[in-house]
Image (cartoon, rainbow, N blue to C red):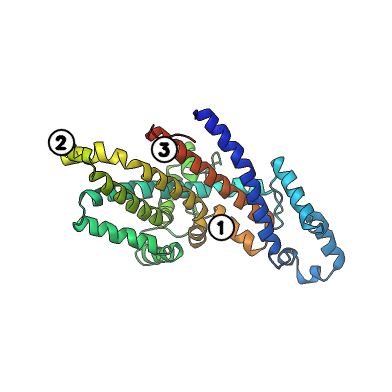
């Protein structure tokens, strides 16, 4: 199937999938037995039926569920994600403000996971059943098993409170004046503004949460790359390459790693999607002003429009990442058909 036809087909499949996500999200939020107005109005205001009715009419809470859903879908088609009851701003504006911080964190965590995970998996496979392999397996097992929130609290306690090697929660030193917002990515905006002090502080604040967030993905990538490499290293063409007198490094890097890249690409793509969606705990522990923290605060206050907006955003990211992975598959291995 040609690439353009494949692109068009995937886009067409995506549309009903996104509407299914909105329907499921709406049903789940509707089934929650709580009144969102109770979270934003005082007890005195809640005791006044006129005030309560006025708020219900303003936010559409007086309409039946199916009518509210149809109104939401109609607004969504026009690009309107609704308005937050708590911030009283459009959800699109709130997401645009919080999303860059999550992207910055997820990209840094993915880079750490790939830079550490791929070489560790390759070395573990090349040194199978040796000390390096055992150490890599133990590290990857710990990274997969340890919960992110517990690892985050442990990292803060050790590197911030006791050793004081890392800064505390937040994106930057609050004493520094932030640069003008261009991309929302603090490290990029500080470079564009020529603010080396802000860049250094932002990078320093980014290290610990990205290490914590990337630990699980790094472990997952290590395990998948190791398994793929072990399978490839047992193939006949690898024995042929060795029999020709090639050095082991050339056999591993030039012949084995390329053929083991397909499962690694899948793992990296899914890891990025998981990082975007799983940044909730990390952002909460490190007071990181990203989309995950925004979703948690919205859920606590029963602010349904932001919850739906974030759910839809995460679904779009997952779909986009899976699409990129599928195309990468076909580009890396022409024998894989886009179908």
Visible in this render: residue 305? yes
Compute the Cα span from label 3 to label 2: 28 Å
The crowd level at tag 3 (other Cα within 10 Å; few <14, some 14-19, many 20+) is many
Callout 3 secondary element: helix
Q: Which residue is mark 1?
A: 293
Report x, y in % for residue 65.
77, 57
Question: Do residues under tags 1 and 2 come within 8 Å of each other at their CB atoms?
Answer: no
- Say whether disc 1 or disc 3 marks the residue closer to the N-terminus: 1
Q: Give residue 246's mark.
A: 2
Visible in this render: residue 303? no
Query: Hey, which quadrant is residue 334 in on the image?
Result: top left
Q: Give residue 234's mark.
A: none
Report x, y in % for residue 304.
68, 57
Compute the Cα span from label 1 to label 3: 34 Å
Q: Residue at x 44, y 60 (%)?
A: 168
Report x, y in % for residue 217.
40, 53
- Say whether disc 3 or disc 2 marks the residue closer to the N-terminus: 2
Viewer-nearest of discs 1 and 2: 2
Q: Residue at x 46, y 44 (%)?
A: 187
Callout 1 secondary element: helix
Pick the residue in front: 287 or 194.
Answer: 287
Callout 2 secondary element: loop
Report x, y in % for residue 105.
47, 50
Question: Do residues under tags 1 and 3 come within 8 Å of each other at their CB atoms?
Answer: no
Viewer-nearest of discs 1 and 3: 3
Q: Give residue 329's mark.
A: 3
Does residue 3 lie above or below 91 as drawn?
above
Pick the residue in front: 267 or 314.
Answer: 267
Apparent side of residue 126 relative to residue 183 in the rendered image (left or right): left
Q: Residue at x 65, y 53 (%)?
A: 308
């Amino acid at each position: 199937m040609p690439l353009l036809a494949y692109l068009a087909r995937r886009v067409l499949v995506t549309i009903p999938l996104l509407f299914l996500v909105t329907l499921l999200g709406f049903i789940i939020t509707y089934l929650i037995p709580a009144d969102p107005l109770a979270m934003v109005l005082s007890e005195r205001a809640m005791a006044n039926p006129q005030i309560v009715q006025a708020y219900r009419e303003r936010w559409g809470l007086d309409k039946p569920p199916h009518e509210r859903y149809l109104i939401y879908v109609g607004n969504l088609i026009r690009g309107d994600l609704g308005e937050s009851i708590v911030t009283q701003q459009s959800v699109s504006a709130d997401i645009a403000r919080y999303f860059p911080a999550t992207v910055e964190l997820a990209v840094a965590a993915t880079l750490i996971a790939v830079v550490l995970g791929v070489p560790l998996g390759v070395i573990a496979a090349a040194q199978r059943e040796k000390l390096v392999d055992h150490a890599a397996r133990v590290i990857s097992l710990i990274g997969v098993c340890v919960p992110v929130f517990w690892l985050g609290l442990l990292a803060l306690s050790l590197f911030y409170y006791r050793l004081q090697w890392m800064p505390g929660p937040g994106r930057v030193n609050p004493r520094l004046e932030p640069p003008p917002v261009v991309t929302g990515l603090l490290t990029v905006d500080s470079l564009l503004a020529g603010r080396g002090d802000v860049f250094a502080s932002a990078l320093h604040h980014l290290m610990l949460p990205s290490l914590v967030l990337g630990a699980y993905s790094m472990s997952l990538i290590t395990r998948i790359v190791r398994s793929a490499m072990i399978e490839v290293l047992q193939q006949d063409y690898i024995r042929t390459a060795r029999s020709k007198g090639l050095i082991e490094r050339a056999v591993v890097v030039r012949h084995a790693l390329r053929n083991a890249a397909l499962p690694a690409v899948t793992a990296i793509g899914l890891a990025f999607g998981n990082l975007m969606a799983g940044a909730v705990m990390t952002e909460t522990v490190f007071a990181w002003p990203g989309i995950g923290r925004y979703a948690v605060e919205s859920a606590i206050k029963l602010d349904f429009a932001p919850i739906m907006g974030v759910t839809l955003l995460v679904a779009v990211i997952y779909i986009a990442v899976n699409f990129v992975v599928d195309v990468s598959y076909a580009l890396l291995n022409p024998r894989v058909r886009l179908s």
